[in-house]
Amino acid sequence: MDHGNHWLLATGLYLGAGVAGVLLAKRLGLSAILGYLGAGIAIGPYGLNLVGDTEAILHFAEFGVVLMLFLIGLELEPPRLWALRRPIFGWGGLQVLCCAGLLGAAAWALGWTWQAAVVAGLALALSSTAVALQVLQERNLLPTGGGQAAFSILLFQDVAAIPILALIPLLGGVKGDGSPWLEAARALGVIVAIIVVGRLLLRHLLRRIARSDTPELFTAAALGLVVGIACLMQAVGLSMALGAFLGGVLLAESEFRSELETDVEPFKGLLLGLFFMAVGMGIDFKALWAEAALVAGLLAGFLLIKSAVLWALARGVGVPVAERPLFTLLLAQGGEFAFVVFQQAEGAKVLSPTLGAVLTGTVALSMLVTPLLLVVMDRWLAPRQGRSTTAMPELSEPQACPVIIAGFGRYGQVVGRLLYANGLKPTVLDHDAEQIETVRRFGFQVHYGDATRLDLLRTAGAAQAKVLVVAIDDVDQSLRLVEVARAHFPQLTLVARARNVQHYYALRDRGVELIERETLDAALMSGRSVLALMGWQPYAARQLAMRFRRHSVAQLERTWPHHRDEQVLMSMSRQGRQQLEELFAQERQTRQARAERHWGAAAGDSD
């Protein structure tokens, strides 16, 4: 068989096994990750033995993790990333130090050499970025408190992997080829170069490619960008995933963010599936069976130790109680980077081949067990907490309604009910599974999905719709949806909800004109009631409330062009408040004068 045929057969084998594994897992109510792992075990050396070089496949499939970190970087604008610096280095550093210290101490107590104990503790302290972020994205939990805490810890682990790899040759007594200072300077130089090139050249290059109106060229450029950054980082001994994340952050504020996400997403999903299959193929069941007692003890021990540390950390950083089990479970498992650490430790003679195989198999088993524990948690723990953590199926059938409502909470429901009452049936999107289950019981047809995704908006019929109601509760997601809609569906008229004045300004900056502050009218109606209770005539109270509303909206429009200049904004706000008070004072004097004339005329008539 020639090489070309062999390559085609291998590709068909991986794709077929992946599809079959995921379909079977979904049929059994399990996660897609477990389906990929099971498919890898089935075709691997200890299953049907249909594949050979599983290590090479694993290295290739790791690019799925790289693409995932690139997409995560696109979600984080530099100011938001800077705001997360304390959680990343505080919570992340605390997790790695505590877990590595306790696990290393336990390994040393078992009689391992101190070098092996240090390597084992550091490697087992790392978690699977691929599994954790995939689950958080599927359940739309990244914006939550637990999701942000987990992301911060995972990002620090990617950074921590660099010094861990640098430490291994020192533990094995092997000297590096060059000066550590020189290596550090090279690494710093590459990071600076990526930042400079990303700021100055990448956007101009992507703008030129976009003008060519060749979609496949833009897709090739997007993949080439990620591959190039990953190769640069790997060349200086840094994490490919960290480099891809940095590249994503640099492009997070560009006008091409949505296109990049849409083009890279399918490749990320496919390669992540191949990565999980490679993990399943790489489990050495022969070595694990020979050391079954040791493997069982290691697996149970390191999961329990990490779970205890993570649960305490979750309480300390304020992760909501309902999110703590998922937070703990996702980060308690071993990580894909541990495979690299153990491989290099074997090469540096820090770990024996047998111990290296046992540790590698233990980490792989932890990644295999985690999806099973997730199923147990969803079916047993979630109902006891009175909420569902299982993901709903996303909107997949194309819609063709003239109005789309994004977000069906307390604000979106009022808009939707008004439209339904007047014979308009909108397409409604929401990403809160619990909220959807609740409103569906009242007869509303609500589709599950993240409205900020370009592909989902197309499925919802945004290309043909006339109006998009932006009723999303989260400010960042609301602004992102506006950006996507204005860039790709210019025919849409946007009607947006503003949480506060700052949100109003941000929406106006993005060209939205029909904006309503969510609390303004409710507060004015309450104020109108108070005026009536204090003696104002109902019609007069209503007039004053409406006049106040018109003045407030006009004042916002006047101050909007200056909202970035705090001094000018404060001055204009004070002037507007003073003008309103003077206007109302004049009206009170006018009403009082009219009343006096009325009473005077009445007295003259009586005489």
Image (cartoon, rainbow, N blue to C red):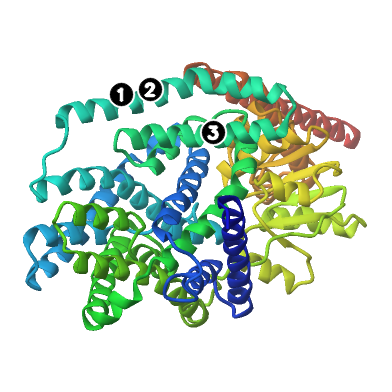
The first of marks 3 and 2 along the sequence is 2
Amino acid identity at mark 2: Ala
Amino acid identity at mark 3: Gly
Asked whether, in this view, residue 362 is left or right of residue 174, the answer is: right
Amino acid identity at mark 1: Gly
* Marker count (numbered): 3
Q: Which residue is mark 1?
A: 189
Provide the secondary structure element on which disc 1 rests.
helix
Gap in angstroms between the C-alphas marked 3 and 2? 17 Å
Asked whether, in this view, residue 466 is left or right of residue 84, the answer is: right
Q: Which residue is mark 2?
A: 193
Numbered circle sitting on residue 224: 3
Tags 2 and 1 in contact by the CB under 8 Å rule?
yes
The x and y percentages for residue 103 are 18, 65
- The 10 Å Cα crowd at callout 1, few under 14, some 14 to 19, many 20 or more, is few
Provide the secondary structure element on which disc 2 rests.
helix
